[in-house]
Amino acid sequence: LQAEINIIQAYPVLMRPRGRPVVALMVDNTEMGLETLAAKGFSMITEGDLDDDEA
């Protein structure tokens, strides 16, 4: 077991920042979720990244 994080909500984001697909996740432990996903090579974006996207 690498990490026990419960996903509360997950949904696709229709905007594609930097031309890449995005999935929004709500987890029960945000800090652990960020660390675990980053360790597995996933990129994190913020709400600001979505605002800056012109596509």
Image (spheres, rainbow, N blue to C red):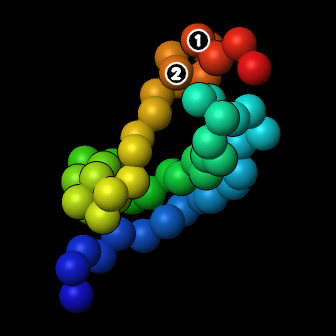
- Tally the marks: 2
Q: Position of residue 31 (x, y in %)?
A: 25, 48
Instruction: Check residue 10 in the rendering and tell me which mark sits there, or answer none.
Output: none
Q: Residue furthest bottom?
A: 1
Q: Position of residue 20 (x, y in %)?
A: 62, 42
Dot 2 alpha-carbon crowd within 10 angstroms: few under 14, some 14 to 19, many 20 or more: few
Side of 32 relative to 42 (left or right): left
Residue pictured at 46% horizontal, 28% vertical: 46
Name the amino acid type tagged 1: Asp
Q: Quadrant of the C terminus?
A: top right
Residue picked out by circle 2: 49
Instruction: Establish if 28 lies above or below 22.
Output: below
Q: Quadrant of the N terminus?
A: bottom left
Quarter of the image where one finds residue 27? bottom left
Say whether marks 1 and 2 touch (CB < 8 Å): yes
Residue pictured at 58% horizontal, 11% vertical: 52
Residue pictured at 71% horizontal, 51% vertical: 12
Dot 1 alpha-carbon crowd within 10 angstroms: few under 14, some 14 to 19, many 20 or more: few
Q: Position of residue 35 (x, y in %)?
A: 23, 53
Instruction: Establish if 38 lies above or below 53.
Output: below
Residue pictured at 59% horizontal, 29% vertical: 18
* 20, 47: nearer the viewer: 20
Instruction: Establish if 17 lies above or below 30.
Output: above
Quarter of the image where one finds residue 11? bottom right
Quarter of the image where one finds residue 50? top right
Name the amino acid type tagged 2: Asp
Whole-angstrom CA distance, mark 1 to mark 2, is 5 Å
Instruction: Check residue 52 in the rendering and tell me which mark sits there, or answer none.
Output: 1
Tell me if I can see residue 32 in this picture: no
